[in-house]
Amino acid sequence: MRFSLWSGKEEEDSSLDPGLEGSIQNLEVRLKDGAHRCEGRVEVKHQGEWGTVNDHNWRLEEAQVVCRQLGCGAATDALRGAHFGPGIGPIWFRYTYCHGLESVLTACTYPVPKDYHPEGLSHDQDAGAVCSRKQDPGILDLELRLIDGDRSCEGRVEVKHQGKWGTVNDLNWNMEEAHVVCRQLRCGAAVGAPKESKFGPGIGPVWFHYIYCKGQESVITECSYPPLKDHRTEGYSHNKDAGAICSAREVRLKDGAHHCEGRVEVKHQGEWGTVNDHNWSLEAAAVVCRELECGAAINASRGAHFGPGTGPIWFQYIYCNGTESSLMDLLYDPSLTLTHNYWEDPWLGLDGPLSAKLKDGAHSCEGRVEVKHQGEWGTVNDHNWNIEGAQVVCRQLGCGAAIDAPGGAYFGPGIGPIWFHSINCQGKESLLTVCRYPSLKDYRPEGLSHDQDAGAVCSGKSCLVWEGIPSRKSPRSHSQSSYETMDHSL
């Protein structure tokens, strides 16, 4: 298992993206030996020959990209163990890693394609995918409603298909799916995703056997689900109908000279409250003005400019890019908001850059994650640490893409403060300080230890190729000097 620079010979036929381990444009993909063209064994054409993909790390995210590339709708299953029979010819991909949002398989991360047969892989581990097929316009415009709740923004989830209202089975039903329902209905954020017919059993078809959403989709037809049909014939009953409870926020501007200026207030759970000005910006103000049909935002006042409000402070912070049509569309973590009047453990984001480095790895693009705060270097606890957090660190340091996010002090325990108790990143942020995290302080007095220091392994600033399956072993660099010249200070 090692890193190597992409060879000059391969570059003649390939286009490389520095954020990837390997990238080959225009690679043909197909699904073979399924019941139709949108399901089957995943095969890719490389160097004029069709080959397969090993199922190591094969998940719904990778299948989603294959289905999207083939115009086959959403992925409904990611099958392993040569479910559609073993292929023949080369095994071009030892593994592939996708976020699920890529448009083509070559936009994902993967080792250099070659025949991995000689390395002990066999077609008994060929990956497969089942797609929902490309949906017709009627499904793309699927109507949705919440029924039998105390108000219009809570109740049993029902969808209208083929002119008839039906329900959604609660298999895999959770907050991510409820968030999409609430967003589609413009009912704010989801605050509950009840199962087992909490709002009473529906009648008519059970249109959805299950549905899988990431929580960021704008409508449920952007999620993954099997073809719509009445699943009652398969034994599903209305005793497991899914429901959703949305926050149904209202917004107003208070104590200004007119209704289009003032203190921003939000109504939640029947009570008006305010928005803390941390991270408050003209972009956020623009969304409020747009929602209230008050034209363009010309100022984003802070520090209780229109006087302090009363009652709850519903939002500790809020983040917008300015293009959203409503506060309901804003990027915040609903699991961390709308739960307390005042936060007991507030999540903060620093206004200025925080220096970061990777320590005690084989090179400067892997190692224990350390951050400099109050003039002192400290570590990040591995609670909630994942590939998304590592991705942000790698991006901040100009080290390419993250390929591993080891915890448990894999690169050895650090010394000094543990500045981060936890951190929550989406993976798209440019700096760690754009992520969500508790107030920075030394968390050792609260029982955290350096045995849980977080680490990151990045692909490197140069385009590097991971030759082998990712593991907890440190990769070896073939160009140490190329890392030494990098400036990772902020």
Image (cartoon, grey):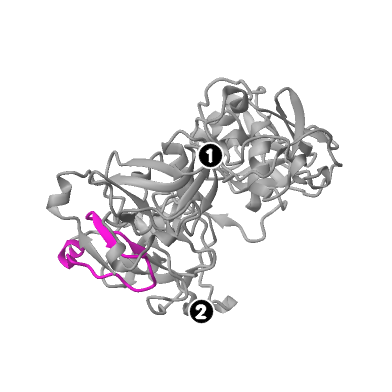
Q: Amino acid at mark 1?
A: Ala
Above or below 405: residue 53? above
Residue at figure coordinates x 37%, y 41% from the top left: 29
Residue at figure coordinates x 50%, y 69% from the top left: 382
Magenta residues, start to end: 457-484
User: Is residue 16 among what the camera can see?
Assistant: yes
Q: For residue 412, which quarter of the picture?
A: bottom left
User: Is residue 306 among what the camera can see?
Assistant: no
Residue pointed to by mark 1: 74
Residue at figure coordinates x 42%, y 71% from the top left: 378
- Check disc 1: other Cα within 10 Å, few if <14, some if 14-19, many if 20+: many
Above or below 382: residue 49? above
Q: Is residue 423 magenta?
A: no
Q: Amino acid at mark 2?
A: Ser
Q: Measured from the top left, where is residue 447 in percent x and y?
A: 58, 78
Above or below 196: residue 258? above
- Check disc 2: other Cα within 10 Å, few if <14, some if 14-19, many if 20+: some
Answer with mark 1 or mark 2, whichever residue precedes in sequence: 1
In depth, the one of 326 and 262 nearer the eye is: 326
